[in-house]
Amino acid sequence: MPEFTYEFTASEVVPEFLVGEVQSKLAYVDEDINKATVSPTGDRITLHLRLSPDKQRLAELEEKTQRVVLSMVKGAYKPKVQVLEDHLDRPIPYNLDPHIELAARGEISQETQGVFALGPLVSRLINYFERRFLELADSFEAAPYRFPTLIPARYLERVKYFQAFPHSLTFATHLREDLDAIDHFAQNAACQHDGALTVPLDTFSPIQTLLSPAVCYHLYFALADQSLPQGKVVATAVGNCFRYESINLSSLERLWNFTMREVIFIGEKEFVLENREIARQRMSGVFEEIGLAYRVESANDPFFIGEFRKQAAFQSAFQLKFEIRARLPFKDSTLAVGSYNYHQDFFGRHLNMTLPDGSPAHTGCVAFGLERMAYAFLAQYGFDPRDWPAAFKEVGL
Ligand code: ATP
Ligand code: ZN
Ligand code: MG
């Protein structure tokens, strides 16, 4: 498809530490944007557009883009990045893009943008990492839970998710209980070229349910409006998570539908913070055995444009999030394969989940992205099991 590029000067210079965040948010500015880049100097923006727009449309696109830049950049200050562990220089034998080999071997097959079926090699690797994560959960005697893939809108509303991450939501609906609507659908439903169903929107029931964006929320809701009798909970669960990341979706690095294993801590502030730290130390030993090149550093969540500056600064200031960033040698960058999170008493307050003394419970979670874990490992160690660390003998390849 022919592409049209449009370049202009940013209304505020985007500082280096925000270039990635701003760029990823520009994906949501307009459907006609295929790709958006901010120059390394932060002063020029290039939009790659689907169509060749007229002057008025270009002015509109530029205005919307400038709004994002202004709201994210004005008054932003550089967060102090705190590095808790640095093993980025661990020697690793591979430096090619695993996506190419994965596709060539039929190990990944793309169903649609950001949605992949995974073959036996990736599945065995994921099972192996799962066993290691379950060992971590067992070391805390975490109680196992199973949560649904769907999550009620009411739940997400209560924890302000719609304000924090509206851009990445995925909605679930069904046909209305109406014989004519169902009949009409059965007779006429067909996909257009782009795969979209040709169905009038009023055929669908109003949205009450979404696809879950995280695992631990389900536990907080199960314990909402209660006092925790023991004053603490440690639990673990794995689940499908959905985050629509638009044009940022890419290979196994950034999926629409991915899987997360979490170990979740609920209790007093000290209980949550201490266990988050113990989990990090235990995982440090596991990552050493696995031979992963990575570092653990402070981070923030990818909040939506308007919320970004305030919320991200808050997370940084209170050290609420640390990411395990694995090295991707083929592109000389890093990718978050997991995170150590502390939510303070946010969920305790909003969900009325209390400790025996009546105060709101604090929560935290350790979350691993299973597809990313396998992807980062293959990016560092390649496809020949003879090159893999001894710990992988039990994978059985
Ligand atoms: P990123 O910084 O890459 O956007 P995140 O900060 O949103 O990720 P968390 O909310 O901390 O991620 O989720 C825990 C883990 O889940 C991440 O460390 C990552 O391994 C995985 N994960 C998150 N989003 C995706 C995605 N779109 N595709 C695949 N894995 C993901
Ligand atoms: Zn969590
Ligand atoms: Mg992140």
Image (cartoon, helix red, strand yellow):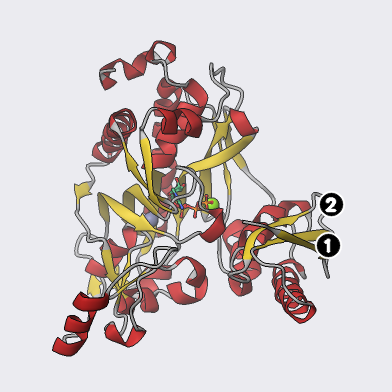
Picture quarter with the N terminus: bottom right
Is residue 231 something that shows in the picture? yes
**Residue at the limit of the structure toward the left, as seen here:** 179
Task: Name the one closer to the observer, 208 or 298.
Answer: 208
Residue 113 pos. (x, y %): 44, 54
Image location (x, y in percent) of residue 255? 44, 51
Q: Is residue 166 left or right of residue 37?
A: left
Secondary structure under the numbered disc 2 in the rendered image? loop
Which image quarter: residue 92?
Answer: top right
Going 79% across and 78% down the picture, which residue do you hit?
55
Neighbour class for label 1 at 10 Å: few (<14), some, many (≥20)? Answer: some
Front one among 291 and 114: 114
Residue 13 - label: 1
Q: Name the residue under label 2.
A: 41
Which residue is pictured at 42% across the width and 20% down the height?
A: 383
**196 over 36 or under it: above or below:** below
The type of residue carrying mark 2 is: Thr
Which residue, as the protein is rendered here, is positioned at the far top? Answer: 386
For the residue pair 8 and 266, the one nearer the viewer reads as 8
Q: In this view, does 179 lie to the left or right of 93?
A: left
Indicate the quadrant where residue 121 lies: top left
Q: Is mark 1 within 8 Å of ligand 1?
A: no
Kindly identify the amino acid type of the residue bearing the numbered disc 1. Val
Residues under numbered marks 1 and 2 in contact, where contact means CB atoms less than 8 Å apart: yes
Above or below, 150 against 162 in this view is above
Which callout, 1 or 2, points at the residue further toward the start of the chain? 1
Residue 161 x %, y %: 44, 72
Q: Answer yes or no: is residue 301 visible.
A: no
SS for callout 1? loop
Residue in the image at 48% along x and 43% along y? 251
**Other residues around mark 2 within 10 Å, as few (<14) / some (14–19) / many (≥20):** few
Which residue sits at x=67%, y=57%? 2
